[in-house]
Amino acid sequence: MFLDRLLGMVSNDVAIDLGTANTLVYVKGKGIVLNEPSVVAVDKATGKVRAVGSEAKAMLGRTPEGIVAVRPLKDGVIADFEITEDLLRELIRKVQKRRIGLRPRIIICVPSGITEVEKRAVRDSAQHAGAREVFLVAEPVAAAIGVGLPVGTPSGNMVIDIGGGTTEIAVIALNGIVNETSIRVGGDEMDEAIVQYAKKVHNLLIGDQTAEQIKIRIGSAFPLEVEMEMEVKGRDLIGGIPKTIKMTSQEVREALQEPIAQIEAALRQSLEKTPPELAADIVDRGIVMTGGGALLRGLDQRMREATNLPIYVADDPLTCVVHGTGKVLDSLEHYAQVIMKSGKD
């Protein structure tokens, strides 16, 4: 214990929200120091990392033959073990700076529905990337702590965390998850739905980054007071040449129907599984939405209409999870109960 405290004083212990779309890093005593896309550009011939984060994301779909830009996480879990390790190593190196040789303790938040094999993959990646110790925290618990909900009390707190690859819906009480529903639907599936809509309706082939921009600029889950439109550039599937079309917010809403309906169904399922005493607390307290997907216009309104419950978006939904993980890092003893157990613990 004393050695841990001593090492903690001289090393930069970090909390990481290892997301499908973005990875955020919180350093003890400093707050959030990095917010980078979870993308790595690798030289195919040598296997060397060419770029990480924003620089690598700018290369997606634009690289020459010798370089490949990869998103190593899919649906909230590791799809490419080695490249995840490269990503973590680069991020740890950036935050450690001059403190070379001192291995940090790392807390990583992961989907609540993660399997033992996936837990081991996260732990191993972090240890190979230079961690002294690795702890895991479930994303909805971290989100609830980040929002400031009283997770240690016997009253029910409900969180919907919509990330890039997963949507986590959980009822939390006494530092634990009473019931949770985890579906592998999130911002990425919304982007893919827009890509498919453009292909089917407009015969236009667009990239994931273009789809993401459409979602951010004119996407919505509920009719808008003033509908919007934007110019979309892509490749004509019939003529094979670049072309520009106009896409409206009504069309994007239609494109997003399926992923949003899946999130709505998961919320209903979670509410059906909630014990009655905790359900009463949720009626009083409402439900908090966090994660980048919560920023989709009118999504809270759509969920309110579907459940007749008070639903609101957290103040800074993108950073709730990493802030919560950071609070756990700052008070490991206080939050010991929220650390995920694995088969070997």
Image: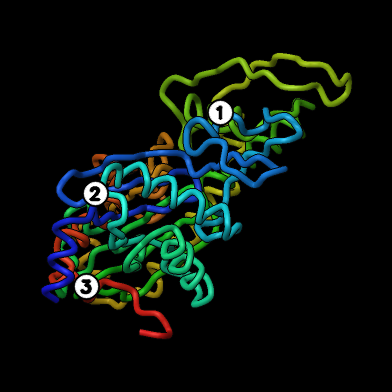
**Dot 2 amino acid type:** Val
**Label located before the other in sequence (1 or 3):** 1
Check disc 2: other Cα within 10 Å, few if <14, some if 14-19, many if 20+: many
The label on residue 35 is none
* Element marked by disc 3: loop
Q: Which residue is mark 3?
A: 175
Q: Residues within 10 Å of mark 1 (few under 14, many from 20)?
A: some
Using the image, determine if residue 109 lies above or below residue 253: below
Q: Give the SS element for disc 2.
A: strand
| Closer to the camera in the image, 110 or 126 | 126
Q: Is residue 122 above or below residue 64?
A: below
Q: Residue furthest right?
A: 239
Q: Quadrant of residue 104?
A: bottom left
Q: Is residue 9 left or right of residue 94?
A: left
Position of the C terminus by quadrant: bottom left
Give the side of residue 302 with respect to residue 283, left or right: right
The disc, 2 or 1, on the residue closer to the chain's N-terminal end is 2
Q: Residue furthest bottom?
A: 344
> From mark 3 to mark 2, how far is it between C-alphas?
23 Å
Foreground disc of the pair 3, 2: 2
The residue beneath circle 2 is 27
Task: Identify the image quadrant of residue 175.
Answer: bottom left
Read off the residue under disc 1. Answer: 58
Separation of residues labelled 2 and 1 (CA atoms) = 26 Å
Q: Nearer the viewer, mark 2 or mark 1?
A: 2
Residue drawn at x 53%, y 36% is 51
Is 171 drawn above or below residue 311 in the view shown?
below
Q: At which x and y percent is residue 2?
A: 11, 74
Amino acid type indicated by mark 3 = Asn
Label 1 and label 3: CA atoms lie apart by 40 Å
Residue 325 location in percent, x, y? 27, 57
In this orientation, which residue lies closer to the viewer: 261 or 335?
A: 335
